[in-house]
Amino acid sequence: MIKLENVSFAYGNIPALKNVNISETEPIIMGLWGRNGSGKTTFMKLLSGMENIDAGSINVNGITPYNNKEAMNNITYIQENHPFSVLWNVEDTLRYGELFNKNWDIELAEHLIALFELPRKKKIKNFSKGMQTMLQIVLGLASKAPVTIMDEPTNGLDAYMRKQFYDALLNTYEEDPRFIILSTHHIDEIEAMCEKIAIINEQTIVRYEETEELKMHGVLLSGSAKSIESLIEGHTILEKRKLGKQINVMIDDIFTDEWKLRAKEAGVTVEKAKLQDYLVNYTTKKEVQKG
Amino acid sequence: MNTFTGPFRLMMREMSLTFYINAAITFVLFAFYNILGFMGVADAGVFILFGPLFIVFLIYPFANFSGYKYILSLGGTRKQFVLALYLTAFIYSISSVVILNLFYLITNNINSTINLLHLAELTSSSNWLVYLWVDFCWIFFLFSLGMIVKTIWFNYGTVLTLTVATLLLIIGTIIVVFGDISWLLEVIFMNHLQFVTSLFGISLVFLLSSYLLMQNAPLEKSDRLLWRQKKAY
């Protein structure tokens, strides 16, 4: 599906990606998480062939995507603010979707248009943010491209429409398994659908793991400073907050029954940190300290 | 399906609106001039019909460059964008030549007294193919001129483009003021067919240069580096 080896890319003398290595051979749904400026968008642009790598090698479904006309049949990249012409309405978008994608599923496209209740004749330039996102979802899912990349696919959607999107995504994936990348700032929104999650930080991919494995990380301890200090010794502290004599500490470890036992013995509260909080702290180097 | 079909159809659609508007303006002018001719109030004048369609080809590359991001975002390539733009411009330029010359033909055959200027009159030829060729060369040249300017502007930004334009203007002024351009005027007015054929040759050079610049163009305007910088990673 995809293989990137030592991929680097810079805008002039500003590095955007450094020595990125990632490989995936299975058609899975992958989450891509990173903070602003971490390199997510550049990573997706390189995968889709919109930009060319400066160093390393890139292979997406058997092709090098940059300036490769075959990329059209293999990769679909739906940007967060996907460009639509001021002349287009929904029907134009469907027509171009069909012309640009050899696997275009017209039935799925029609189903999604009806599901999202999108007006077919109204100019897209007059759509709300949520409606544009829905149209982007139609374009992304109905393309049935072997590698489908969607940047912030739920931006502007209300809770109901998000659920519709999740259901549609899982249904079409089940019917036609393909490699789908969902990029987001808010991992909570997509983690339930992703088999694996790639974490991008400081212009490189720092983690690429099974979602279930990643979700086990992050131990949150609350209690008296004295009790906690002995517990966290030797562990990597991701966050430490003092509230009078109490402290809250997040450490980078797997949340296990052993932690529950140790916390109980020490008289402190322990819980699993939320994945989003864990990732934010994991990628915020300035707050990291060694216990 | 051929991977070029999508980019081509997209560019045809993008360019259609400006083409239809200008074709309609040309039709209105054609009708207006002929009404003046029938009224017999414009016997001494020479009227220009080709203005709107000629000008629109100069601005086509600017007005339709948005097709670049649409094609790339749908999975097309830079080369496909340029080739689709060229092919579309070629088709619309042929259509424009046919429309213009059809209007000239109708005007000449309905006994209107109006005199519509056709640049092919400078060739002193009565061959209808020359009339088509002259219009085509001018339209194609204007499109290629717009294309090379837009390409440089898009790749290198406003500052460099205006700098180059200013330099060219200064050089042009020096040549006009201090040089002898009588030979050029002679070619334009005495050998117009040779002149427009030269324009066609220059058009090909402009279009080839634009193609070469665009095949690795940046995604965003003026992001291209003038020279390779040392990469920072």
Image: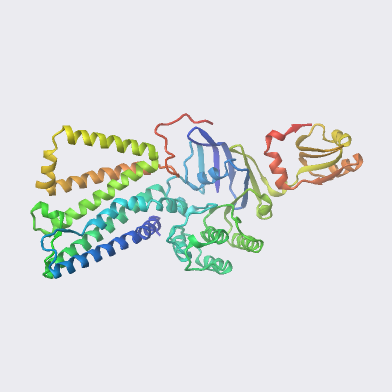
Residue A251 vs B30, above or below: the answer is above
Which x, y percent locates residue B161?
Answer: 35, 39
Counting every numbered tag in the picture gives: 0
Nearest the eye: A204 or A136: A136
Quadrant of res B45: bottom left
Name the image quarter holding the C terminus of chain B. top right
Whether residue B85 can be seen here = yes
Nearest the eye: A225 or B56: B56
Q: Residue at x 68, y 47 (%)?
A: A210
- Residue A223 in the figure: left or right of residue A135: right
Whether residue B215 can be seen here = no
The furthest residue to the front: B41
Residue B158 vs A128, above or below: the answer is above
Nearest the eye: A66 or B142: B142
Q: Residue at x 47, y 46 (%)?
A: A50
Residue A93 vs B69, above or below: the answer is below
Applied colour scheme: rainbow
Q: Residue at x 52, y 56 (%)?
A: A145
Name the image quarter holding the N terminus of chain B. bottom left
- Residue B9 in the figure: left or right of residue A207: left
Which x, y percent locates residue B98?
Answer: 21, 62
Which x, y percent locates residue A263?
Answer: 87, 41
Which x, y percent locates residue B206?
Answer: 28, 43
- Residue B69 in the figure: left or right of residue A27: left
Q: Residue at x 24, y 58 (%)?
A: B94
Nearest the eye: B47 or B91: B47
